[in-house]
Amino acid sequence: MTSNAAAILGFGQTKFRTVREDVSGPELVFEAVSAALADSQMDINDIDAVVFASAPEVFEGVYEPDRWSIEAFGGVGKPVVRVHTGGATGGSAAIAGARLIESGLYETVLVVGLQRTSETPDAQAVFTTIFDPIFEQDVQLNVITGIALVASRQMEYFGLTEDHMAWVSKKNFDNALLNPFAHLHKNITIEDVKNSRPLAWPLRLLHTCPRSDGAAAVVMTSGANAKRHKSVAWMRGAGHATDVYRIGDRIKDADSDLAIPRALGWACDDAYREAGITDPLNQLDVVEVYAPFANLEIGYYESMGLAPSGRGIELVETGATALGGKIPVVPSGGCMTANPIGATGLVRFGEAALQVMGRAGDHQVDGARVALATACGGIDQFYTAAVLASDPE
Amino acid sequence: MTETVRIPGEWHIGYQYTIGTFASAFFDGLRKGEIWGSLCEQNGEVAVPPKSFNEQAFVPTDKLVQVGLNGTIQAVTIVTAPFAGSPDVPYAVIYVKLDGATSSIANYMHGVDLGDGTTLPDALSIESPVHAVFSPEPEGRVTDFWFEPGVA
């Protein structure tokens, strides 16, 4: 890692819910930014630039939600950029913020994510519009049907079963009970998952995520400045990678299969190389993966290098990714228990930072010093990976 | 405590999607009961549906080529929860690699009893053979064809 590494000073998030009727979109942003500044012991005047993250504005029904929120993130008089890579937006924005600091352009950067998925009644009607209007929309592809198609290949490729998915759902819902900011706080059983409403074979309601309102913010600063702060998370490595647009172009050969997203693997390769990680299963202490569906999390185990080819399900079978296991995955409960889309990647990043700062509260992984945070966007197009650590090198 | 207000709003925006000559040739083929893809001679890839360039080689596509009407299932789902504008549930959507193609194309699967949609019929398992069937009243949309089980 270079000597000019960026460091995360603090993280703020709103309590995620279906609707926050007491605040407008910008007011939600103000709440998260205020929490992040307080957590960082910083002032809005300490911020040199802002990176704003929001996914499809069709959810808000307000074009350019970044512009709507300028005052709420203290943007007046400062450079502001919006980042948009679908669901990966929050992850891309966090990495963009860190790179702005590492490049020497700015000393301290605020990264903000917002999404209100509740403003329109039909989320899947919005999601249909992210598909190709020529060949895909007429076949009613949306996020749920798209991920169900992925699951069908995972069953074939590595033997994914309903039992594996139910275990992941229960693990994540159990973890969410320890996180006061999670949207869903529900005690569920394996049987509840297996008997939940079928949506699109093989997916059921409890394999999926809720639609959440919420905002999140992270304050990051230069390495030199960070040394004046007691509790920081160092950005040790990062990667972005992108794959082809059409689903059908990712069902070609062994190197390109929907079951195991290769672009997350590429993003992790870059992040690990920069961070000096050669054995992720043993060198990482905790993972905050962006996986809004149970089956995706299991496929990602392999993409993230936690398991050899075709053997990600063994981490389920041995319970390795539970809190207290060898490599806890989403101790916060993750996207399956709160998904404010454009902010979600930043929540993963912020939660990973809290873990290595030892400030994650009841879902703290004991002794966590190195964490991986990821994000995914589109239907398998955009991936980000970031390695955060307690020490600068 | 003030009762909070929510103000109704709507976006009504129409579009005409411009699809270009390659995709237009595909829809013209459907009217004749044919399926066309695009061949990249540099790497041999045959993309279905066709496109005017190959992203792997990053060169323009050399020509349109006709592919077979038989193929195999590559991915499958049975939708049991209706979405806005969706057909009656349950219905099946599959990705199929047609004979001669190197990529897969999505469409509806008809001609299989889906039951309540919670178990996968054998005819829908991955690598099962299917064939394209064409609408007698084409509309210039991808739904001018669909898949049915077995070989044509």
Image (cartoon, rainbow, N blue to C red):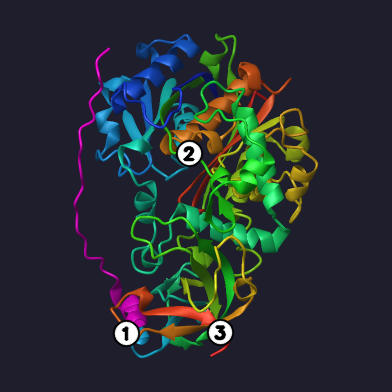
Q: Main secondary structure of the magenta part?
A: loop
Q: Are marks 3 and 2 on the same chain?
A: no
From mark 3 to mark 1, how far is it between C-alphas? Answer: 20 Å
Q: Is residue A161 above or below residue A325?
A: below
Which disc, if any, is residue B99?
3
Q: Nearer the viewer, residue B70 or B8?
A: B8
Going 41% across and 21% down the picture, which residue do you hit?
A: A32
x then y, percent, for residue B69: 50, 86
Packing grade of label 2 (10 A; few <14, some 14-19, many >=20) is: some
Residue pointed to by mark 2: A210
The mark closer to the camera, 3 or 2, is 2
Question: What stretch of residues is rendered in magenta?
Answer: B1-27
Q: Position of residue B13 (x, y in %)?
A: 19, 54
How far apart marks 3 and 2 lie (CA) works out to 40 Å
Percent coordinates x, y for residue B130 in the rendering: 56, 81
Check if residue B18 falls in the magenta segment: yes
Query: Between residues A59 and B116, which one lies in front from this camera angle?
Result: B116
Q: Residue at x 59, y 9 (%)?
A: A230
Indicate the amino acid at tag 3.
Answer: Asp
- The single residue placed furthest to the front in the displayed view is B115
- Whether tag 3 and tag 1 are in contact, CB under 8 A, the answer is no
- Check disc 2 and give the amino acid type: Pro
Whether discs 3 and 1 lie on one chain: the answer is yes
The answer for which chain carries disc 3 is B
Please give the chain letter of the residue carrying mark 1. B
The crowd level at tag 3 (other Cα within 10 Å; few <14, some 14-19, many 20+) is some
Residue bearing the label numbered 1: B28
Q: Amino acid at mark 1?
A: Asp
